[in-house]
Amino acid sequence: MKRVLILGGTQEAALLAAQCTQLPGVDVISSLAGRLQRPTLPAGTVRQGGFGGVAGLVEYIREQHIAVLLDATHPFAADISWHAAEAAQVCRIPHLMLVRPPWEPTAADHWLAVASLVEAATLLPAIAQRAFLSIGRQELPVFAQCTHLWFLMRMIEPPASETPLPPGLVLLQRGPFAVADERVLFQTHTIGALVSKNSGGQATAAKLLAARELGIPVVMVQRPALPAGVQVADVAQARLWMQQYLI
């Protein structure tokens, strides 16, 4: 029996876990960061919570006799990606990063690229008075000082009661979303700008298409740097790579 550790929390990770559990002689463990109170659990064994840095991940890999490490975390979860790369090197096990391709603007888009959410918050007042924040709940405090603006804030679960929030409305929804619904959302709330991380994928891409159709500018936060190593762009490629070590 060979054991695979999937660092997950994404749709791609869940799909890969479901496929790998069907392989004979393979035991799949998915690790979730634990940020959601009611996450959608993938197939196989699931653990939740952090490892305690590189040392903790190395210890877990050795204790659980992990044969293959696959990083399928969110593109902005850079810390765990760096930890995974180092831990795999220390433990001398195969390591793969499944990195979904970033969104790319077209000639019809009006994107303003920024390096961070702090930069986005600084830039926003010059662009719009009403903005749609599609960034999740963890980074909302970055915009809490923008008290002269109004925000539509969409997330899967509500922020903690003590979280500083900017003025506006919290909307609890889970993707995927339809372009027509996103267009209505922009128009209903008179949105003048969209703030998004460049996460890639189809589940939340509809907001970008709606912004394009309505001529709304997008403040797009660029991805953090990832460690060097083997990367694939989709689940099919990841499974092919893994099979060489599991069969």
Image: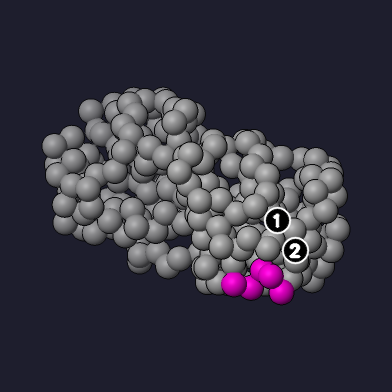
Quick check: is 125 in the magenta stretch?
yes
The residue sitting at 36% across, 25% down in the picture is: 44
The residue sitting at 68% across, 53% down in the picture is: 151
| Most foreground residue, 35 or 127 | 127
Question: Where 64 sits versus 111, above or below?
Answer: above
Residue 126 in the image: x percent, y percent? 71, 74
| Most foreground residue, 137 or 76 | 137
Residue at disc 2, secondary structure: loop
The residue sitting at 50% across, 34% down in the picture is: 15
Q: Which residue is mark 2?
A: 129
Q: Earlier in the sequence, mark 1 or mark 2?
A: 2
Marks 1 and 2, Cα distance to the nearest angstrom?
Answer: 6 Å
Question: Where 242 sits versus 128, above or below?
Answer: above
Residue 138 lies left or right of residue 24; in this view the side is right
Whether pointer 1 and pointer 2 mark residues with C-beta atoms closer than 8 Å, the reply is yes
Quick check: is 13 in the magenta stretch?
no
Residue 181 seen in the figure: yes
Q: Which residue is mark 1?
A: 150
**Three-letter amino acid code at the position of disc 1:** Trp
Residue stretch in magenta: 122-126
Residue 89 image label: none
Residue 170 in the image: x percent, y percent? 64, 42
Residue 101 seen in the figure: no
Residue 235 in the image: x percent, y percent? 50, 43
Question: Where 45 sits versus 190, above or below?
Answer: above
Residue 72 in the image: x percent, y percent? 42, 47
**Three-letter amino acid code at the position of disc 2:** Gln
The crowd level at tag 2 (other Cα within 10 Å; few <14, some 14-19, many 20+) is some
The answer to which image quadrant residue 191 occupies is bottom right
